[in-house]
Image (cartoon, grey):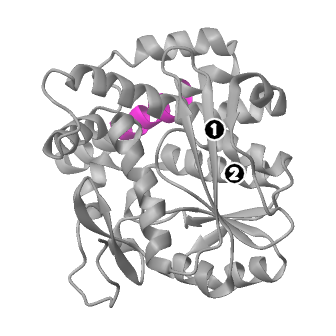
Amino acid sequence: MRARFRAAYRRLACECRDALEFVLLPGLAAVLPWQWAFAVFRWLALWPGLYRVDTEQALAHAMAHGLCTPQTAPLFAWERRLVQLVDHADHYLYRSRGRPWLERYVDVTGHWQDADRAGMLWTFHWGAGMWALLHARQAGMRAQMVLAAPEGPGFAGRSVFAWYVRARLRSVQHALGRPTVFVPGGMAGVRAAMARNEQLVVVMDVPEDRVGPVRLARLRQLPVSVPAALPDMAVALGLPVTVFTMGLDVATGRRQLHIMPMGVHADAQALSDAVFAELDRLLAARPAAWHLWAQAPRFLRVRAVDNRARPPA
């Protein structure tokens, strides 16, 4: 009886925390003017209990890789919590404000290209990228997002979190105006999108244990295993690649969308090196905005297999 009571208590505590962190607090963005909501978010980000486990893990790994020190740890943790809060709030912002919000609060550098042909639009688990999807659609891109299916052990006993993730996926589809391609098992959807001269939006910094073929690239002067299949496809099919990122001005709440067309590459290794050099730059400039710090041991490593890809120079 006691064991069941403790299990029920832990479940209730988890559901309440998820409701607070993924629904109630970020949902303030839907009911307050953005300037007010962002001021509240900056204040809430001072609370050490917000996203506590993830923040503590991120701090430890960022310190281990030299991107955070005991002196800068309080600022790193504050920015980390703020970026997470804003990233979750974007789901509610998008559903309640739409295109007028984008036109008012997003600053854009660069231009989307090759809207009339198949291509790759790549980004990273950095910043808050929801509004980039709507911007791409407004610019004429016909893109589908490639994402992991919303299932697995991380959803067990977390009904609120599962609801939030699925609702956010619907927002992604709505922003792009195209269905999502779920992986694994989504190659048929990928090939169909290419045949229709559409684009694929892919988050490229995926832990090596979640992808098939890998090759080496460098991050923070370390060799790491990164996805090889999509760069190989881009080279084999002559597809243009565009890298985009969406940063957050932590002082004002404005967004900075950077669009970097990289053209067509003839060498998959050179393409991978160029793409992950951009992630390396982001980690050096704004490390707290990277969402995968808590999973860094899974990502910043080399898979112990012979993938026949040359190491980067």
The kind of residue on which mark 2 rests is Val
Segment colored magenta: 12-24
Q: Nearer the viewer, residue 80 or 123?
A: 123
Q: Residue at x 69, y 76 (%)?
A: 239
Q: CB atoms at circles 2 and 1 under 8 Å apart?
A: no
The kind of residue on which mark 1 rests is Leu
Q: Nearer the viewer, mark 2 or mark 1?
A: 1
Q: Position of residue 153 (x, y in %)?
A: 37, 63
Read off the residue under disc 1: 257
Q: How many marks?
A: 2
The secondary structure that dominates the magenta segment is: helix
Q: Say if the magenta span includes residue 15.
A: yes
Q: Nearer the viewer, residue 249 or 24?
A: 249
Per the image, label 2 sits on a secondary structure element best described as helix
The numbered disc on residue 172 is 2
Left or right: residue 3 versus residue 14 is left
